Amino acid sequence: MNRQALVQAIAAKQSYLCVGLDTDITKLPKHLQQHPNAVVEFNKAIIDATKDYCVSYKMNTAFYEAMGLKGWAAMEETLHYIPDTHFKIADAKRGDIGNTSSQYAKTFFETLPFDAVTVAPYMGEDSVRPFLEYDNKFTIVLGLTSNKGANDFQKLIVSNTSNDNNLVPTLLQGNTAEYLYKKVLATIAQWGTKDNLMFVVGATQASDLTAIRDIVPDHFLLIPGVGTQGGSLEDVSKFGLNKDGGLLVNASRAIIYASGKEDFASEAAEIAKQYQVEMRGYLQ
Amino acid sequence: MNRQALVQAIAAKQSYLCVGLDTDITKLPKHLQQHPNAVVEFNKAIIDATKDYCVSYKMNTAFYEAMGLKGWAAMEETLHYIPDTHFKIADAKRGDIGNTSSQYAKTFFETLPFDAVTVAPYMGEDSVRPFLEYDNKFTIVLGLTSNKGANDFQKLIVSNTSNDNNLVPTLLQGNTAEYLYKKVLATIAQWGTKDNLMFVVGATQASDLTAIRDIVPDHFLLIPGVGTQGGSLEDVSKFGLNKDGGLLVNASRAIIYASGKEDFASEAAEIAKQYQVEMRGYLQ
């Protein structure tokens, strides 16, 4: 799915909701736990129940890998069940040296035909470029994450140089200093375009969104952390929406575990619908 | 395998070589390419041929994931073939918010019983902690990587604060400024001990090793980038070895693709032996 199709889907559905299929086998409703293919059954029911209210599904690979081979198979089967009308994200947070990142790009764009994959920025340009080489696929780089640990490194103050020489004079120019995550956004925005690059921006820090939109006004932002992680959908929408929508707001646990009982799917639909109705208001 | 056993293996074998099983199915010798389980056959032959010269094996998950289900099965089968006398590393470069990192820790410490997994630092403390909670397992955090992109962010100059207030005054204290990767090393060293924490340090930057040893004198360092990536084993050993050895030097392509023909295993053994002989010299 390309950018234009995503923008159209958002306009048509009046929703920028992404449902996170972070399915933990230990948290499934009791009646499903003995099912031989419980995770896939659960995911299919969630997809059927929520697909009218969302434009995207995101699978965090960790939950599938933890189950080994069976989990990898469940990820594959779930992926193929998601309608092609929906934008499919592998939340894998991968990244390695160039020739190895190429293997990850192959994994999530060919072997598993996702539309997008999340990528960690720490290893720099040659770790990100192989993902950007695919047409009509998106690389979603971590900018500012929604967890407490985001403060440890992402909010360090960096000088606007990576040059070994004359470090102190550059550092002394106060106006070149910024948060690491802003430097990451500004640098990586130059490696791709709004047609192949997005950023993860943690919703619990909505006050930072204005500054982020100054750096990347046109790119889509994937916003985790609304719902269980405590971000405000109103703030995120107010400061993050652009003329194309430009947001994918993810909710995982708040939707898929809305009920732990046999009505889990209808309850998930109810919560997803509440998000959609709220989003429709912000889009108008 | 715990730290003491690793230290003993290094002393006994007079080697701190890690062989990287980054097996790309398109690069296998021709006579193996039609084998129904080619990657595993190749890996087993490499392990048989090199195990006397190395103390560790590292599998980069990217090469296995790119093959999908079959690749994940090959990784599992290879892992179980590696002798328990050897330190087994999943080079996965994972990291996510706390509850999700727990799933990755489960993946590589339980579902796949590796001794260690590589972890990306960008998401901070709660993304690293879940890995450190396992006894006799090692978290190997990316410090300074061996690729060109290491300069993009890892060598940014950061001020020694993550505090929102009074940024400029702190920034102006030149003596608190340092490379991001040094801040990462110093910060993360406080979260674990030499018994559960190691760092990835790119060998192509051996001149930085003295400064790195000032920050983490006792931790093991995993050094990629010797061989094909151009690092000098002599420099790495001179500046990186400590009283326990304290190094795992990885070579992948230089060993596993030493020959692309039927003699690939014996040629791999020959190169691994050359490394071991050179290492014996540096250990004495």
Image (cartoon, coloured by chain):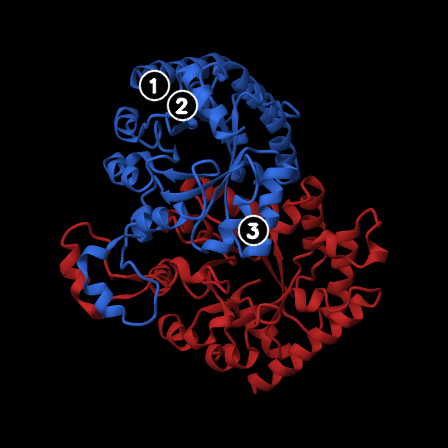
Chain colours: A red, B blue
Q: Residue beneath label 3, please?
A: B101
> Which kind of residue does numbered mark 2 sit on?
Tyr
Dot 1: element: helix
Left or right: A222 in relation to B71? left
Front residue (pair A65, B248): B248
Q: Where is residue A206 in the image (x, y as percent from the top left)?
A: 47, 75
**At 25% across and 66% down in the image, what residue appears?**
A177
Query: Contact (CB < 8 A) between labels 3 and 2?
Result: no
| Subunit ID for the residue under disc 2 | B
Q: Position of residue A251 (x, y in %)?
A: 62, 68
Left or right: B184 in relation to B173? right
Q: Residues within 10 Å of mark 1 (few under 14, many from 20)?
A: many
Is residue A142 shown above or below B243?
below
Quarter of the image for the C terminus of chain B: give it.
top left
Going from N to C along the chain, the mark reached first, 2 or 1, is 2
> Which kind of residue does numbered mark 3 sit on?
Ser
| Subunit ID for the residue under disc 1 | B
Q: Distance between the residues labelled 2 and 1?
A: 7 Å
Q: Residue beneath label 1, please?
A: B279
Q: Distance between the residues labelled 3 and 2?
A: 29 Å
> Which kind of residue does numbered mark 1 sit on?
Met
Q: Residue B16 carries which label?
A: 2
Say if residue B215 shows up in the picture. yes
Dot 2: element: loop
**At 66% across and 25% down in the image, what residue appears?**
B36
Left or right: A170 in relation to A234? left
